[in-house]
Image (cartoon, helix red, strand yellow):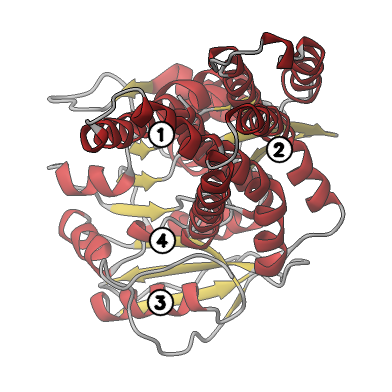
Amino acid sequence: MLSAVGLTYEIAAGRVLAPFFGTSLLTWTAVIATVLAGFSLGSALGGFVAERERRAALGTVRAALVATAVLMALSPTLLGLLHAWGARGTGGMLLSVFLAFFPASVCVTIPSPFLAKVAIEARPGREGSSLGLVLAAGSVGAIVGAILAGFVALPLAGSTATFAGCGVVALLCIPLLRDTDPSDRNPVVLLSAGGFIAFAGLAGGQACMYESGLSCLHVVREDAEVRLFSDRTIQAAEPVGRSETPEFALSYARWLWERMDRDLGPDPEVLFVGGGGYTLPTALLESRPEARAVAVEIDPLVTRVVERHLPQAGAMIEETGYDATGAEGEPEGRLGIVHADGRVYLNETDRRFDAAVMDAFSSSSVPAHLVTLETFARLREIVEGPVYVNLIDRPDGPLARGVHAILTELYPHVQASQGSVGERGRANIVLAASAEPFAPLDRAEDAYEPVRISEARPFTDDRGWVGHR
């Protein structure tokens, strides 16, 4: 049971970290390394506890379980406080991960050596098989915890409730401890810990307005604009109310649309990898009645939130959207929606397109498997016309250089423009690549200027993008 709690906690830690520091190879490495370090130290300390006199060992194990319950329920609150106090960048992320998740990881494994010792002592002469069964039970528990976290707890209950649930399970383990002196049990401590978990976890504020196993979403209305945030990074925005011509609240979308509007004919079929706020597909279909689009969005929750809160994109989805997963023949609508990973769709589809827009994000970073040479090589096989890419990176940063290197290897004509640099030193960098020369724009987005991207090694599936540092 404790193994299941530990793995559920580890996966939930990676999920709840995303709204503060994003999701990348670096954040998951930090979480996994920290939690495993806590497990290691807890096992070592638990070994010394197991050698103590039985009554004293039981008391320490109970205390460790109570501490586990409290610390696990407190983890998301502590993470939020550290971020509010100024924890930023890689150093702040590492410090936050250690302070928020290491103590509970230690405490949850302290009971394990004692429990293993009890199991071995219960079968004299069969110590080897007893130890094997204990290790197997731990592995099975870890598997169950991983499945529960990824498929049940996080998608259905959310991260805050998942942490509280881990604490509750840790408390429920205490009555299962067998001893010879019931007077050692202190119900006041258990009730106090349970009350704290209810307050810090279940009664606490939700980490997300809408949450799935993939996304932590917030919708904010400011004046005449609706904004969609994912992991506290703005993903899309719309002015409230319809207009005769497409309107864009985000400058990068205006640049991409001006480029698309100039390059594409009256009836293109365009692939959008990354649905987000469905802003660009909506603009395409509104301005070109004969156009068609397929939007690949990994998280169905994003589509549901857009339908509910973004008026223009929501209306377009309602009017002409259809499920394009495995669709054959002539579709009834003009906006096909596929809820799948973009790379998987590219690998499996047999459809061909006139253009493609790569605008998929996980937090503030592009998923590594979508910015590799192999991905864009496959894209060129199924897309006859231009490809447009939106990135967030430092000026001439490693992501921009790697993707630019991919495009210049595959296409003879590549354009790059950059928006204004934000507080974190990053900006939207938009690229367009084509086999044919680009015509000049009649009215380029004023906030974007052409930039020179330095030469670099193209990202590949073997050596790819690792996330913002």
Identify residue type, mark 3. Answer: Gly
The disc at residue 83 is none
Q: Residue at x 73, y 11 (%)?
A: 183
Which quadrant of the view contains residue 405? bottom left
In the picture of the structure, the residue carrying the numbered disc 1 is 116
| Residue at x 64% of width, y 29% of height | 65
Residue 446 appearing in the image? no
Q: Amino acid at mark 2?
A: Pro
Residue 402 badge: 3
Label 4 or label 2, whichever comes before in sequence order: 2
> Outermost residue toward the bottom?
455
Label 3 or label 1, whichever comes before in sequence order: 1
Q: Is residue 434 above or below residue 253?
A: below
- Give the mark toward the camera: 3 or 1: 1
Residue 308: x %, y % from top left: 60, 19
* Mark 4 crowd level (few <14, some 14–19, many ≥20, 10 Å Cα): many
Q: Which residue is mark 4?
A: 388
Indicate which label's residue lies in the foreground, 3 or 4. 3
Please tell me which residue is depicted at 72% across the width and 53% down the height of the picture. 99
Q: Mark 4 belongs to which amino acid? A: Tyr
The residue that label 2 is drawn on is: 76
Q: How far apart are the two marked residues, 3 and 1, measured between alpha carbons?
A: 50 Å
